[in-house]
Amino acid sequence: MLKIFLVTLLMLSISAVNSAEVKWHGVLDIRATQANTLESYIDGGYGKFNSHDGANISLAQAGGEFIVEWDTGISAHIVANAYSDKNDSTVGLTEAFLKYRALPNDAGYRWQTKMGIFYPEISLENNAFAWASRNTLNSSAINTWLGEEIRVLGGEVALTRLGKFNDNGFDITVAATAFVNNDPAGALLSWHGWTIGNRQTLWTESKAIPDFRARMPGYDLNEQAEKSDPFLELDDNWGFHLRSKIKVHNKGQITVGYYDNKATPYMVENGQYGWRTRFYHLGASWRLPEAFELTAQYLSGDTLMQSPARVDVVNNDFKSGFVALSKRIKKHRMTIRLEEFSITDNDLTVGDNNNEYGKSATLNYTYRFSKPLFLSVEYNWIDSNRAARMYTNQAIDLTERQWQLAARYFF
Amino acid sequence: MRYLCLKVLTFFCMSYGAFAADITVKVLDKNNKPLADMVVYLESKANISLPLNENIVEVGQFDRSFTPYISVMQLGNKVNFKNKDDITHHIYSPIGENKFSYKISAGQSQIKSDFEQAGEVAMGCNIHDWMSGYLLIVDTPIFGKTDKKGQLNLTVQHSGEYKLVVWHPQLDALDNRFYQQVQLSEDKTITVKLDNKILKISEQKNEEDFDFLSDY
């Protein structure tokens, strides 16, 4: 499927090279980190940062977007990301899609469709090139999770009513996406809990799962594969995402949506289970007086994974929300973000306690050194209670802290 | 050259017994404050054909906004859409007989000469939704926009009865217009006092101060 899509994309770009506009954008993010944490969730630990304990220097992101735009309103987008730190180096695609934006009709209504591999439009933070977070180095728990496990292969149809043709000061969008290839989403959230980082899972990547008792021989989850691959289709059921956005001109936006991957929870193939994951999300970003900007988002849902005999193995409710306040003074920007998150374990599986509750604070100062170059210092603090850390003899109550220095170059 | 043409034209008109009167139009709101950027035009009530106003109107896209916000041209003339930004714009008008759409690359221009109907052309950019501009197409060569003092000077070559029209896209009136009959036979100052409000003009401003956003 992916190959066919890429070949089509390539053919389109070659055949129409004369009437097309080709654009390159991207971000380079080099960081020095000093963290007081456990082994990172990226490597199968229970550490909540994607950086490692102690002092490290990493290529936190090398992201690129390749865009071909035709005069017809069709555009092709390929987004790739690379990461490199002391434990691993990876490079690959994160998104690849075709988009068609029609012209508005005489009543100011406009259709837009999107097909391919993309993020369901949920994040209010990760709208810089290559899905980089704009005001902070690490994304919120909500968006770190979206970057890790939520990605779809499908199509979205969106209808926007433009206020300027209707004497209204706002635009309204409603959109529906039908998708496949996101059946195991929920596994990593359940097993390592909420995290705060900037790593996005590549389309072809699988991610390590922490050690816990239920994965040992003789326990319920012994059949689970070593790594979880969130972007698989196991049951050929279509999932959906519905969303709506109201954009008030020069003020801000309010978003709401509902995601359901419609996965069959008792399907298992090669150790990858179907996880029926559903959530709703609410968000707003608003411009306040004195150049303050407030962003807040809340996400709440559940996930269910069963044995082939249809007995609940993992049945969790999850919630997370954040409030971020940001202010820019000329070349300086300060951002503070406060978060809360939880997972409630509703099943009786022995050796797999997923209960979690935590809070997090992020403080960021960014100096815009030149038009494309941003220098940032960021402090991350997470205080969490996670029962599963007992399986690795680590503290159930834990406070993790991290300082980050970064140079981010956008082009 | 244009000056010379005008001279010749004036001489020509005068030799046929026509005249040239300078008409000053002042547009004020109900509190007597001057209203700038109001389009004013005069339509002759008599069945006379007036020469085409051949000044080519330029509708610019600069700093991700339509500059000027309001333009006016005569039906039958050309308009030059000029992108003065370093990014592509996709300008369009979705309404009525004068629909159009052009993608204009950075620094490029697009001349359009085939508008077929007089009336209002509401424009947008399909890449930058906050951009908004208006082009009024009038069927008369006598038109202009008021300055900061709410003032506009027009020259008429034929005496007689005219319809004076004041238009603004946000004028809270039927067809966004105010009409008045005027008799023009000599230099004259006409003061138009509008009781109707000018509704809020949406600011053509990119809401984001971050230049590296991924959308579109």
Image (tube, coloured by chain):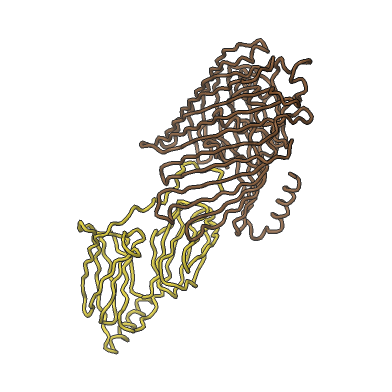
Residue A246: give x, y in percent of width and height.
47, 44
Position of A204 with respect to A113 (left or right) is: right
Measured along the vertical axis of the image, is residue B100 above or below residue A65?
Answer: below
Q: Which of B85 and A73 is in front in this view?
A: A73
Quarter of the image that includes the N terminus of chain A: top right
| Residue at (59, 56) in percent of width and height | A73
Residue A332: give x, y in percent of width and height.
44, 33
- What chain is colored brown? A
Residue A206: give x, y in percent of width and height.
72, 30
Measured along the vertical axis of the image, is residue A6 above or below residue B120?
Answer: above
Position of A386 with respect to B169 (left or right) is: right
Position of A21 with respect to A253 (left or right) is: right
Q: Which of B5 and A67 is in front in this view?
A: A67
Quarter of the image that includes the C terminus of chain A: top right
Quarter of the figure with residue A327 = top left
Measured along the vertical axis of the image, is residue A396 above or below residue B61?
Answer: above
Disc tally is: 0
Residue A293: give x, y in percent of width and height.
43, 35
| Residue at (34, 84) in percent of width and height | B48
Instruction: Say if residue A43 shows up in the picture.
Output: no
| In the image, farthest residue toward the bottom | B16
Position of B193 with respect to A158 (left or right) is: left
- What chain is colored yellow? B
Q: Nearer the viewer, residue A69 or A35?
A: A69
| Residue at (30, 64) in percent of width and height | B146
Quarter of the figure with residue B9 = bottom left
Instruction: Say if residue A88 shows up in the picture.
Output: yes
Q: Which of A347 and A148 is in front in this view?
A: A347
